[in-house]
Image (cartoon, rainbow, N blue to C red):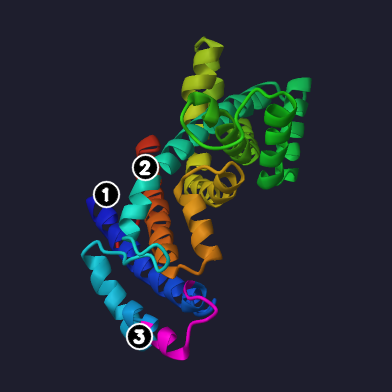
Amino acid sequence: MGRFILLRLLQTVIAIIGISLLIFILARASGDPTLLMISGQATAEDIVVLRQELGLDKPVPEQYWIFIKNLAHGDLGDSLLKRRPVTEMIGERIINSITLSVFSFTIGALIATTLGVVAATRRDTWMDSAVKFLAILGQAMPIFWLGIMAIFIFSVQLRLLPTSGTGSLAHFVLPVATMAFFILPGVMRLVRSSMLDVLDSEYIKLARIKGLPEMKVIWKHALRNAMIAPLTVAGMIFANMIAGAIIVETVFSWPGVGRLSYEAVMTRDFPVIQGVTLMVAALVLLVNLLVDITYAYIDPQIKYQRT
């Protein structure tokens, strides 16, 4: 297991370098950001001076090499527009994004797991049909539309909850509910499918023959093995949540990293784009590593091939 973890860490570093190169190239393909930073009366000399100050006059390979050297020291550069360190800008918002994501993922996963188990144990009943209908309905609703409808109903019409910002628990309700519902359909269907397979297995039948309580059979023995499949796609679910967070934070004006990345894209502030993307990539890769370790813990029979 130790060798496997070291190998995955090496793969993670290589992946981050590859992602940094890709984002570095794509961010600069959107155009010259200096054109957004100067007034309409600026001369060609003013543009040249600004490009020299920002280091944009150097060849692209040299710019990338400078970026990698700074990255090794934890320096993501400075924002082109706000002239502030990118790490400082991300640090101001990362807590808001982590709080939103953790609450949303926890609530969504708990609800989805519970409904998936209920649907599997009540197969072909109205409960099963209701869960399947909810899953289809959830997949048919784009997250931006869901957020807008939540604001319209609970903020505009009923005046129960604030539309944007932070500061109280009431500000959490709509963004958290929207993101939790975003991951609900996929997890529900996956848990239901896995539970159906496990409930038909021989060891579950044996547990029932031994007279174990049905609740213990379902929630301890069956669910533990049924969660192996959902865990394998936890990294993908987390990545989808990051993509959804950009939309949710924009819709609800949530001061998080997702909204920061949206603002950076709209203003071609590629140091911020690079910094946010690398941070998200590192988080996704870390989650995938933790999932693999948890996967092996839940099912000790799993053997990783060592190369």
Question: With 220 as the anchor, is 300 left or right in this view?
Answer: left
Mark 2 or 3, closer to the camera? 3
Please tell me how many numbered marks the rendered image carries: 3
Query: In the picture shown, does residue 271 fall above or below 58?
Result: above
Mark 2 belongs to which amino acid?
Answer: Ala
Q: Residue at x 24, y 61 (%)?
A: 74
Classify mark 2: helix, strand or loop.
helix
**Stretch of the chain drawn in magenta:** 37-49
Q: Is residue 235 magenta?
A: no
Tell me the CA gap for discs 3 and 1: 38 Å
270 or 192, nearer to the observer: 270
Asked whether residue 302 is in view, the answer is no
Q: Is residue 252 above or below residue 286?
A: above
The quadrant of the rendering that contains the C terminus is bottom left
Residue sitting at x 39%, y 70%? 20
- Does the CB distance between marks 1 and 2 fall below 8 Å? yes
| Amino acid under disc 3 | Pro
Residue 240 lies, in percent from the top left, at 55, 50
- Horizontal placement of 156 versus 108: left or right? right
**Residue 296 badge:** 2
In the rendered image, residue 287, in percent from the top left (x then y), is placed at: 40, 47
Extreme residue in the front direction: 41
Return the mark for residue 164.
none
In-front residue for pair 266/150: 266
Residue denoted by label 1? 1
Which mark is nearer the camera, 3 or 1? 3
Q: Secondary structure at mark 1?
A: loop
Q: Quadrant of residue 70?
A: bottom left
The answer to whether 85 appears left or right of 163 in the picture is left
Disc 3 target residue: 61
Q: CA distance from mark 1 to mark 2?
A: 9 Å
Q: Tell me the residue at 53%/30% (across/down).
A: 171
